[in-house]
Image: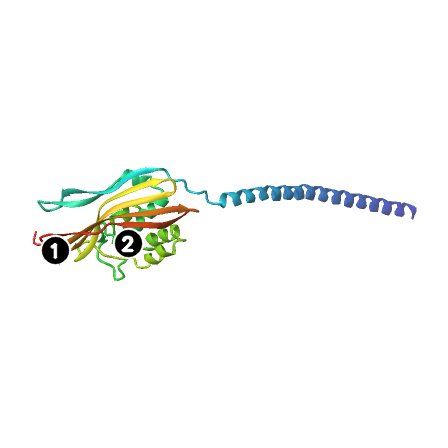
Amino acid sequence: MDRSMHTTHLFTLRWFTYCTLLLVALQACQTPSKSGTQVTQADSSRPESMDTTASVAKPYKLQSQAVKFLWREDRPMDGYDATVSTIVLDDAYVASISDPEKAALGYVATFIGNECAWDGKAAPDRSNLKCKILTALDLGYQCSDTHLGFLRHWFRDDSTTLQKLESCPTIPDGSTIQETFDKIDVAVDDNEIMVTYTVVSINTRQGKTWTWDVKDHFQLHDNGLALVETERSEPTAADFDVSI
């Protein structure tokens, strides 16, 4: 009897010891995990604060420069023994253009024809008008979501400009009455972008043209653009022979 009690007591003692050691082992395993969790949480809190700082857009710093962006040259007309006045763009400037300058030129090009033609057959909703300047600036078709979405983002605080964009025209080359560019110059100084251009309006039915100069002053502020001033000369009229 005493021996049986002794054996039972010994087993109980060993079981208690085993349970105690198991509990200690489990706690030991959990403790590094907990500290690891704490370290992970502490580490993850640091990137969050860094991300918050990074999420604040850095203000654009424009590079002062003066650029001849668009001009015209007489070039051979495909399939004809004749030359035609053709729009030429400064491709090197386009390749390195900043988004604010791109927005300024994209806005100016929205309302003046620049060798615009339907990409294939005209879509019923007139959504596939391809224009030379917008294509060069990678802004898609005239009045497309790509085109207007980009401009609406940059002019988001300029209500007058946003309202004007609601009347985006889709006028292809060859229309009876149309306007086009003769030249475009861009001047950047500090946070101001000035786009100076000459417009030629043509009425083929009447055989008349009107020419005038425009200076659009854009201001960059808080990573947004605003058209702050427009200077426009009086139009000069001229006649031309529609039979030529």
The kind of secondary structure element at disc 2 is loop
Along the polypeptide, which appears first: circle 2 or circle 1? 2
Place of residue 46 in the rendered image (x, y in percent of width and height, measured from the top left): 58, 42
Front-most of residues 119 and 176: 176
How far separated are the C-alphas under marks 2 and 1? 27 Å
Q: Which residue is mark 1?
A: 207
Residue at the farthest bottom position: 124
Q: Which mark is residue 156?
A: none
Which residue is depicted at the point 86% across and 46% down? 9
Count of numbered circles in the view: 2
Q: How is the image coloured?
A: rainbow
Image coordinates of residue 80 in percent, x first then y, are 10, 46
Residue at 15%, 42% in the rendered image: 75
Where is residue 83 shown, x and y percent of the image? Answer: 12, 44
Q: Residues within 10 Å of mark 1 (few under 14, many from 20)?
A: few
Q: Position of residue 93 (x, y in %)?
A: 30, 39
Q: Residues within 10 Å of mark 2 (few under 14, many from 20)?
A: many
Direction from residue 118 to residue 19 in the image, left or right: right
Residue, x 59% and y 41% (percent of image)? 43
Considering every residue shown, the one lying at the far right of the view is 2
As shown in the figure, which amino acid type bears the numbered disc 2? Gln
Q: Nearer the viewer, mark 2 or mark 1?
A: 1
Question: Mark 2–mark 1 contact, CB under 8 Å?
Answer: no
* Residue, disc 2: 142
| Residue drawn at 27 percent across, 57 percent down | 169
Mark 1 belongs to which amino acid?
Gly
Seen in the picture, residue 23 relative to 176 is either above or below; the reply is above
Mark 1 falls on what kind of element? loop
